[in-house]
Amino acid sequence: MPEPVSDSSTLSPSPANDAAPVRVSSRVAALDVLRGIAILGTLGTNIWIFTNVEGLLGYLNRTDEPTGAMLWVERVLQQLAQGKFLGLLTIMFGIGLAIQQRSAARGGRPWPGKYPWRAMLLFLDGLLHFLLFTEFDVLMGYALTGLVVAFVLATSPKAQRRWLIITANIHLAMISLLAFALLAAAPSDSDSEPIASVDPNPYADGSFWDLVVFRWEHLVLFRLEAIFIFPMSVALFLIGARLFNAGLFAPTGGRIRKRLMVIGAVAAPIDMALGLVNGDMIIITRYGVAPFVALGILGLVAEFYARRPAPGFVGRRFGEVGRMALSCYILQNVVASSICYGWGLGLAAQVSPNARVPFTVAVYIVTAALMLVFAHLWLRRFERGPVEWLWQASYRALAERKPASATG
């Protein structure tokens, strides 16, 4: 039987017995809380995309920026979330893979075994999520990364370390080249043509179906980030798995947790300074420094719950979101889309640039509060989130079906 944390160890649930009792421990609390923080934290980055009148393209082109003090408020708020929670979510997924591998070993099952079915289902979830609601979906990329890392985890520790070093160095080389190109670019480049035209603007004026078609037509553009960060994702998955196996959440893991907190404490001011001094350095901050801040958050929360038998009120609310990570991740994007885009309330197009910061903060608070309430009320009655339940049913139908008996 899988250990109790495995049922909520990743964005995709594990094949645990539905009827198995849930035992609460400090490790479960830390995992669920970290996952909830990561989910609501990614919303802190994505919410600025939803509230931009031109969606993701407007966000990349810096369309509709405020002026004066509001511009700096926007930059600070964006930088606080930029990349940190994406990194944390990626690390948590790697931890989830390590938990599932350990569960398989305890149950005498081969690894990666039927995990490819899980990866396929997550990829399909991500594809639907991408087409219907969110062009910056991470599930498709996580599915492919998880598939690769699942097989890497079946190799020796030496081979895993080699994979980690190689992918981390590839990622470092890529962001270094891009950062050099940005620094070497002429100042006049800032006046160049935008990345892509949004005339007519499907985010403000289009129907729901118009946006689906728009995402499909720009599939390559919208999937570039997932391709670009693939080496980083592999490295962070492996870091998460190695940290878990090294005892990050164990009582004896205090030294590991403190080292992670030191790393985060050093990286956080560097990340903020780079982001505020030069907004074009987002390549360095989001993909270079922010993952180290994410490690600091990981160590801080793990240390906090290592000394407490159970979470308090706030921790329980984040933990509930973490237990329904897949449902809340998708739903928060649905809610933000329906508030901001033209097929819904269309409020993003009605807000002036200087009112966009308070508007964005308000949309974030409303959406996050809805996720916290929804997760709490749902889990009072059900063991799994709605998407987790559907995912689990699909997994069992595909991967756990019995072969047809022979006749003759």
Image (cartoon, helix red, strand yellow):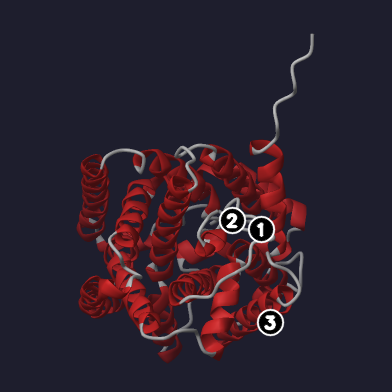
Q: CA distance from mark 3 to mark 2?
A: 21 Å
Label 2 amino acid? Answer: Pro
Kind of element beneath mark 3: helix
Q: Which residue is mark 1?
A: 388
* Residue 82 in view, yes or no: yes
Please give the name of the residue rendered at 34% of the width and 61% of the height, measured from the top-left corner: 244
Contact, CB < 8 Å: mark 1 with mark 2?
A: yes
Q: Residue at x 59, y 68 (%)?
A: 323
Q: Quadrant of the rendered structure where residue 148 is?
A: top left
Nearest to N terminus: mark 3 or mark 2: 2
Q: Secondary structure at mark 1?
A: helix
Q: Is residue 64 visible?
A: no
| Apparent side of residue 33 relative to residue 274 in the rendered image (left or right) | right
Quarter of the image with the C terminus in it: top right
Which of label 1 and label 3 is nearer to you? 1
- Depth order, front residue of 27/199: 27
Residue at the disc numbered 3:
373
Residue position marked by numbered label 2 in the rendering: 13
Q: Residues within 10 Å of mark 1 (few under 14, many from 20)?
A: many
Q: Residue at x 66, y 62 (%)?
A: 203
Residue at position x 43%, y 69% from top?
Answer: 85
Q: Which mark is residue 141?
A: none
Q: What residue type is disc 3 on?
A: Val
- Label 1 – label 3 distance at C-alpha: 17 Å
